[in-house]
Image: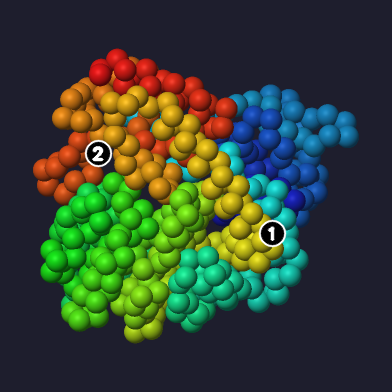
Amino acid sequence: MAESWSSSGIDVHLDWHPESGRTGLAAAIRAAIREGRWQAGAAVPSTRALAQDLGVARGTVTRVYSDLAAEGYLRTAQGAPTRVATAGALPASPPRPVPRDPAPRWDLRPGRPNLSAFPRSAWLAATRRALHQAPMSAFDYTAEAGAAELRETLAAYLARSRGVVADPERILVCSGFSHAIAILARVLRARGAEEIAFENPSLHIYRDIAAANGARVVGVPVDDHGITVSALDSPAVVVTPAHQYPLGVTLAATRRAELTRWAAETGAIVIEDDYDGEFRFDHQQVGALQALAPERVVYVGTTSKTLAPSLRLGWMVLPRFLVEPVRAEMVASGARPALLDQLAMAELIESGAYDQHIRRCRTEYRSRRDRLLAALPDSVLPQGISAGLHLVLQFPGDVPGEMEVMAACRRRAIGLEGLSGYWIGEPQREGLIIGYGAAAKHAFGGATQALREAIFEVT
């Protein structure tokens, strides 16, 4: 059977029988080049390094390299490393599929922040500080609940900025809301809560994740005051109280009290998705629902809207009786955010750079919202404009229809979404969901103008 070898300095793989000697070694290198494992232009190990790893005389390797150079497989040069001279045949991969929905020219898709606003310099500085200060033990297997530094920092930050009742012991770091809802669905099902209610309308992705993890999903109506608490009859419910997604309404104070009272009386769990709670544009502060019932509400926050979705960094603030079951389920799942990102996030908050970034973004998004509203014709009714990164447009009398407006937008390469796709069951209302966070700063004016033209075309 062939043996596998790796050389020092530059790691390579050769299927070589030691007893085959110089001839076998030359054949193994030819095969590596022909099969594309040694690619054209790549440096190969020095004769000394390869001889040491293979346990042969250096002269043997030197003669093999000389023979292969003469055959055109290798290229040598005085004072430079020996390199592969010819291209092999790499294993064929299937062609990359063409995206069904290519990125639009004018990006008004909801649920996306302005990625160009990511605080690169502040994040780099926070990462450097975290690396400099972290003890050696920090690079061992990640703490099951998340880095202690981040949990301690989050406890103070969430209490200060969102009014959350938090301490480090009830905070678990997760990989965003998708991860949180998957974990919670499994934990709640194990405790006998097999049904989870979602606001109707709501984002189908999270409903699908809950269902995939064993939950039976039902919808609960939303009106101008938020979720209709009187219609709840489930052991758990997911809500977006600060800025309902997608309608944009804020859960009224009376409904907040009613919802937490219902949870306390029935023993139900409320899962609060505070996805864009930092971005409120009026002077009416709206804190976290969790503060009203810390032992019945699971608070979930993420960096997906404040920094970038790709960080996959979030946190759950749990009722005390759920901390251990959720921690155990997270350990079983094996998924958790990268330690370095957790430490950098803690540093970003501690330094004040995170608050500064939030305030800059809030100012920019408020300006974008105002510019969008100013560009819209009087024939449309904008809703959900007090907060967040999106608003909903509806047309009086449902004329034109959603599909007609969407078609006009597609003709202009505008990316946005229709309200119809968010309902559980039959759509109850039509409209457009317009995000004003995703477009690059220089492109936002063109995007709003294109949207204005599309609307005027069909009205």
Instruction: Find numbered disc 2 in the image and state the secondary structure of the residue it sits on.
Output: helix
Q: Nearer the viewer, mark 1 or mark 2?
A: 2
**What x and y, as percent, mark residue 3?**
56, 54
The image shows residue 100 at horizontal and vertical percentages of 32, 29
Task: Indicate which disc residue 126 carries.
Answer: 1
Q: Amino acid at mark 1?
A: Ala
Above or below residue 195? Residue 439 is above
Snapshot quadrant of residue 67: top right
Q: Nearer the viewer, residue 126 or 6?
A: 126
> Residue shown at 42%/49% (left/top)?
387
Q: Is residue 449 above or below residue 152?
A: above
| Depth order, front residue of 205/31 | 205
Q: CA distance from mark 1 to mark 2?
A: 39 Å
Percent position of residue 362, x then y: 54, 48
Horizontal side of residue 219 vs 269, given as left or right = left
**Residue 252 vertical placement versus 68 (above, below):** below
Residue 296, disc: none
Specify the amino acid type for callout 2: Leu
- For mark 1, give the secondary structure: helix
Q: Which residue position holds label 2? A: 419
Q: Residues within 10 Å of mark 2 (few under 14, many from 20)?
A: many
Q: How is the image coloured?
A: rainbow
Quadrant position of the C terminus in the picture = top left
Earlier-in-chain disc, 1 versus 2:
1
Res 239 quadrant in image: bottom left
The reply to whether the C-beta atoms of the residues labelled 1 and 2 are less than 8 Å apart is: no
Locate residue 192 relative to residue 205 in the image: left or right: left
Q: Residue furthest right?
A: 79
Q: Where residue 79 appears, x then y in whole percent?
A: 88, 34
The residue depicted at 66 percent of the width and 61 percent of the height is 352
Q: Residue furthest bottom?
A: 321
Q: Residue at x 58, y 39 (%)?
A: 116
